[in-house]
Image: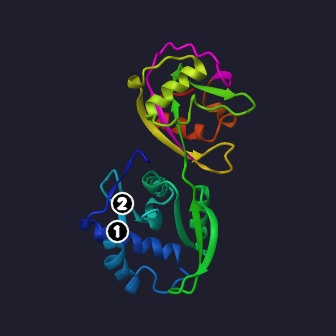
Amino acid sequence: MSSETIIRPYRPADEEAVVDLWSRASKAAHPFIGGEGEGTRARKIREVYLVHADNWVAESAEGAVVGLLGLLEAEIGGLFVAPEAQGTGVGRDLVEHAVTLHGEMTLEVFERNLRARRFYERMGFVERGRRMDEETGHELVALCRPAPLESVAWLCVRDGRVLNVRTKGREVFYLPGGKYEAGETAPQALARELAEELGVVVDADALTEAFTVHDVAHGQNGRPLRMRCFTGGPEDADPVPGREIAEVEWMGRADVDRCAPAYRQVIRRLAAAGVPVA
C-alpha cells in the first residue's frame, strides 16, 4: 500500500466525495458514453451500488477520499480513482486489497477504456470473454486474476546490502524464504525455510512483519505474487547454502536486473522505510 494512503470501509458520510470522484473519473475514462458520470447513472451509484456493494475507499494523508472500490463478493464491480490521484498507486492498492479479501478476482471493463485495460493487464488480469452491455451498447471485456502465490521472505540488510539467494537450475536471485506448508503461520513458514535453505536458526516469535509486496511471480506464467516480508533474527547470521540453494549473495540497487521482479519493490519499500540500500 502507498505509504500516504489508507484503505477503509465506506461510510455514508463519504457519499458526496465518492460520487464526485466517481463522476470525474468516469467522464475521463468513458468519453464514448453519453451522459456518463451524471443523471441516471449517478442516481444508480447513490441508490444501488453505494447501498448494496461492499464498498471501500482510499483516503489520502490529508483526509481526502481519492479512490472507490466496490466489491460484489469476488468481483470488482467498480474501481475509480480521482483524476488528480491517478498514477500514484491508489488503484494498485485497491486491487490488492480486494485480492487480500477474496483471492481470485473477476471484473468487466469497457473495451474502449484502453488505459484501464492496460492497468489491469499490469495487475495480472487476463481476458476470459466479451459481451455487449445492454445499457450503453458498448462491448465489455471480462477479466480474471487468479489467486496469488503466497510466500514469505526475510529482509536481512547488512552494510547497505540485501541478502538474496539463487536456487539450483535458476538464474535469478530471490529473497530467502518460500511457500507455506499446511497449518503454518507466516513466521513459522519463514523460520522453517531459513533453517532449511541457509542453516539460519530464527525463532518465529522473533520475526516482525515489515510490509507485503504484490508483483508477478517469476517463472509462474504471470501468476500474481503476494510476498509477506519480515525482519528479525540474528544480526550476525552466517548463511550457508543448503537444500536447493546454489548461491548466496549480498545485493544492492544495481542488482535489480539479476533478481526476480519483486526485488524492485522491496528496494523501494526499504527506502521508504528509511533503510539505506547501496
Q: Quadrant of residue 186?
A: top left
Give percent across and percent down for residue 1: 44, 47
Seen in the picture, residue 29 relative to 166 is either above or below; the reply is below
Q: Which residues are magenta?
A: 225-249
Q: Is residue 47 magenta?
A: no
Q: Point out which mark residue 109 bears.
A: none
Query: Does the magenta segment cover residue 239?
Result: yes
Quadrant in the picture for the C terminus: top right
Name the residue type under label 1. Answer: Val
Taking the spot 59% from the left edge, 40% from the top edge, the residue there is: 262
Q: Which mark is residue 18?
A: 1
Whether residue 190 sits left or right of residue 118 in the image: it is left
Front-most of residues 48 and 138: 48
* Quadrant of residue 45 within the rendered picture: bottom left
Are there few (<14), some (14-19), or many (20+) residues within 10 Å of tag 1?
Answer: many
Q: Please, what secondary structure does the residue beneath circle 2 have?
A: strand
Whether 121 is drawn above or below 262: the answer is: below
The residue positioned farthest toward the front in the image shown: 182
Vertical placement of residue 18 versus 236, above or below: below
Between 218 and 160, the residue placed more toward the observer is: 218
- CB under 8 Å between discs 1 and 2: yes
Residue 160 showing in the rendered view: no
Give the mark, 1 or 2, whose residue is nearer the N terminus: 1
Q: CA distance from mark 1 to mark 2?
A: 8 Å
Q: Which mark is residue 57?
A: 2
Residue 267 in the image: state x and y as whole percent: 54, 35
Q: Determine crowd level at label 2: few under 14, some 14-19, many 20+ residues with C-alpha closer than 10 A.
A: many
